[in-house]
């Protein structure tokens, strides 16, 4: 059972979706997971709230549970292994909550917390889950991901490295940390506002202006690119926006954060490939589609 979207990604990467008996309401990839029973829920409807309202609602759940867990269904599905996390309060049901829930079951499953902060940590999680699921070729699968990342680094070697501000939430402004600075570095950029492995917090807008980014990446956690586009005025109306080097050079991009940048699963490698295209026009792997990354200059031309 996966109680973390990134863990579902890992299970899919390992070819073990047929073994998945339960998932979260946010697990949306690959499409085949739609038939897997959902064991979590939340009282917050992001479709009805602005970024600022979502942030306020999430903040109101500090110290309590943001997510509900159907313990009865969990017991009925009888998983042998439950994958969860304890890295982020708003990403998924916490390890502590799940461990408390399974203690009341007659034959509790093994509960494993996945908490990677870097790309190496993500690959280590793939290795750990593969070992727990008995995947014989897990080393080959990890090796293939490492080869893809190395191909990105080779493709941009020697090119000028633009200064890049990656924004993971629009209001308040929250820079993307953890593995995202590594994605930027691998793709030939210089990350601003956050360091590799860093668990970030909101910053004041002036910090973004002062950083003078050559490129701005908008990849809000949990929001589709369409939703991000609909809320761009939360940034474009701020003082100094139009004077940013990235804006003047038409180098502001909206990315699919949930798919390739927010979740610590194997698709972070595809995220680095996407950024090679965004930063340098380089194609590594499959061509980048507008659904994965789109330039936004037309919105304020």
Image: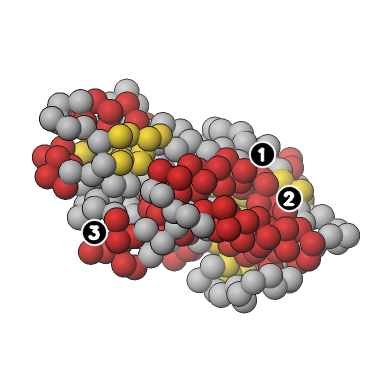
Question: Is residue 229 shown to the viewer in this render?
Answer: yes
Taking 46 as reference, is 128 above or below it? above
Side of 238 where 59 appears, left or right = left
Tag 1: Cα neighbours inside 10 Å, few (<14), some, or many (≥20)?
some
Q: Nearer the viewer, mark 3 or mark 1?
A: 3
Residue under pointer 3: 36
Quarter-of-image position of residue 280: bottom right
Cα distance between the residues tagged 3 and 2 = 36 Å
Residue name at image x 16 percent, y 47 percent:
77
Outermost residue toward the right in this view = 158
Q: Nearer the viewer, residue 76 or 211?
A: 76
> Which numbered tag is attached to residue 196?
1
Q: Position of residue 196 (x, y in %)?
A: 66, 39
Question: Is residue 187 shown to the viewer in this render?
Answer: no
- Circles 2 and 1, Cβ within 8 Å, touching? The answer is yes
Is label 1 in a helix, a strand or a loop? loop
Taking 129 as reference, is 136 above or below it? below
Taking 49 as reference, is 150 above or below it? below
Is label 3 in a helix, a strand or a loop? loop
Residue name at image x 21 percent, y 39 percent:
69
> Which numbered tag is attached to residue 185?
2
Query: Which badge, 2 or 1, comes first in the chain's sequence?
Result: 2
């Amino acid at each position: 059972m996966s109680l973390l979207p990134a863990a579902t990604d890992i299970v899919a990467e390992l070819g073990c979706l047929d073994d998945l008996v339960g998932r979260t309401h946010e697990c949306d990839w690959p499409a085949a997971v739609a038939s897997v029973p959902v064991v979590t829920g939340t009282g917050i409807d992001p479709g009805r709230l602005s970024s600022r309202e979502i942030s306020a609602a999430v903040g109101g759940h500090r110290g309590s549970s943001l997510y509900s867990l159907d313990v009865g269904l969990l017991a009925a599905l009888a998983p042998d292994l439950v994958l969860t996390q304890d890295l982020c309060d708003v990403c998924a049901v916490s390890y502590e909550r799940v461990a408390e829930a399974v203690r009341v079951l007659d034959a509790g499953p093994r509960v494993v917390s996945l908490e990677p902060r870097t790309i190496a940590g993500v690959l280590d999680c793939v290795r750990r889950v593969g070992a727990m699921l008995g995947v014989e070729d897990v080393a080959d699968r990890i090796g293939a991901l490492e080869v893809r990342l190395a191909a990105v680094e080779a493709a941009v070697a020697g090119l000028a490295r633009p200064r890049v501000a990656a924004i993971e939430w629009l209001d308040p402004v929250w820079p993307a940390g953890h593995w995202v600075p590594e994605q930027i570095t691998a793709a030939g950029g210089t990350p601003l506002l956050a360091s590799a492995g860093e668990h970030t917090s909101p910053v004041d807008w002036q910090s973004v202006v002062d950083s003078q980014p050559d490129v701005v990446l908008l990849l809000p956690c949990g929001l589709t690119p369409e939703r991000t586009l609909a809320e761009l005025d939360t940034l474009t109306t701020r003082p100094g926006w139009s004077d940013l080097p990235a804006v003047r050079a038409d180098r502001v991009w909206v990315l699919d954060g949930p798919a390739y940048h927010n979740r610590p699963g194997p698709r972070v490698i595809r995220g680095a490939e996407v950024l090679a295209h965004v930063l340098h026009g380089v194609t590594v792997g499959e061509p980048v589609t507008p659904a994965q990354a789109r330039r936004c200059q037309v919105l304020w031309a």
